[in-house]
Image: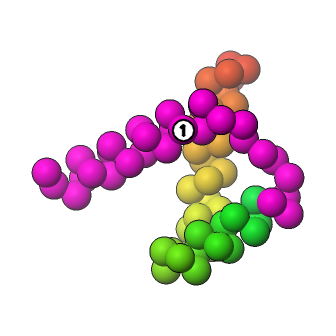
Amino acid sequence: MDEKRKGEIALALLRYDLTQNEIKLNPNDINRRLGNAAKATGITIEELREFSRSLIEELVEKVFGK
């Protein structure tokens, strides 16, 4: 399995997980979770914030329409 396919599967699983659980929009909670994830993964908090924002916006649009 190539890296592109692994990424597609990971994103699909993340989308599934977010739709099955609550998305908490408390800024303090989000910043803490992103900070912890950045430390654990070595991904910058800016990249994680951008990724999270686009994913959450996508899911909100799916629920409420464009």
Q: Is residue 7 magenta?
A: yes
**Residue at the spot of label 1:** 17
Residue in the picture at 60% in, 30% down: 20
Residue extending furthest toward the left: 1
State the extent of the magenta-drawn residues as a range: 1-29
Q: Compare residues 41 and 49 and report the one nearer the observer.
A: 41
Residue 6 visible (yes or no): yes
- Residue 25, placed above or below residue 58: below
- For the point 58% across and 44% down, the residue is 55
Q: Is residue 57 visible?
A: no
Given the image, on which type of amino acid does mark 1 rest? Asp
Q: Main secondary structure of the magenta part?
A: helix
Q: Is residue 39 left or right of residue 65?
A: left
Q: Quick check: 21 left or right of 17?
A: right
Residue 64 x, y percent position in the rendering: 73, 20
Front in this rendered view, residue 23 or 56:
23
